[in-house]
Amino acid sequence: MKLLNIGENLQCDLDREVWVCGRCQHTLGSAHANVKQGLLVGERDPREIHPPLLENQEYTFAPNPEWIRILEFYCPGCGVQIETEYLPPGHPITYTTEIDIAALKQRLANGEVVIEHGHLKVVGA
């Protein structure tokens, strides 16, 4: 199994061409699709994460929840957080991670790159 680390808790299984949780190896969906489609989503009030620095003031330095929302994405297998994004209310979830799997597999087959401990390494570098 060729596992490529994409983030702290996200890997791509290049053999099966699927996203997997880096902690529990739960399959999260096709690596040709947005990984967020296979994750649990929680929405947080930005004031919970960025508490006001000034009390009882018109301006508090905390994000206004009418202007921004914080979405947290979790593995449905073990609950580890995979990603977070800040979006305006009503904005669709973004597609932030895309890999040209065919090109990467070709480069691996040609010996241009190898995967060592989950990381790509250019051969000869």
Image (cartoon, rainbow, N blue to C red):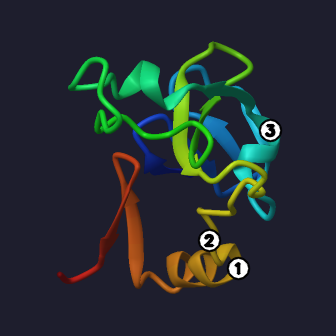
Measured as percent of width and height from the top left, residue 10 is found at 53, 41
Residue denoted by label 2: 99
Residue closest to the eye, 7 or 53:
53
Residue closest to the eye, 99 or 44:
44
Q: CA distance from mark 3 to mark 2?
A: 16 Å
User: Which amino acid type is shown beneath numbered disc 1?
Assistant: Ala
Q: Residue at x 62, y 15 (%)?
A: 79
In the displayed structure, 113 sits above or below 29; it is below
Measured as percent of width and height from the top left, residue 50 is found at 34, 28
Measured as percent of width and height from the top left, residue 68 is found at 56, 46
C-beta proximity under 8 Å, tags 1 and 3: no
Q: CA distance from mark 2 to mark 1?
A: 9 Å
User: Which callout, 1 or 3, points to the residue nearer the camera?
Assistant: 3
C-beta proximity under 8 Å, tags 3 and 2: no
Disc 3 crowd, CA 10 A, few/some/many (<14, 14-19, 20+):
some
C-beta proximity under 8 Å, tags 2 and 1: no
Residue denoted by label 1: 102
Disc 2 crowd, CA 10 A, few/some/many (<14, 14-19, 20+):
few
User: Which amino acid type is shown beneath numbered disc 2?
Assistant: Ile
Measured as percent of width and height from the top left, residue 80 is found at 54, 20
Q: Secondary structure at mark 2?
A: loop
Residue denoted by label 3: 38
Task: Give the quadrant of residue 94.
Answer: bottom right
User: Which amino acid type is shown beneath numbered disc 3?
Assistant: Gly
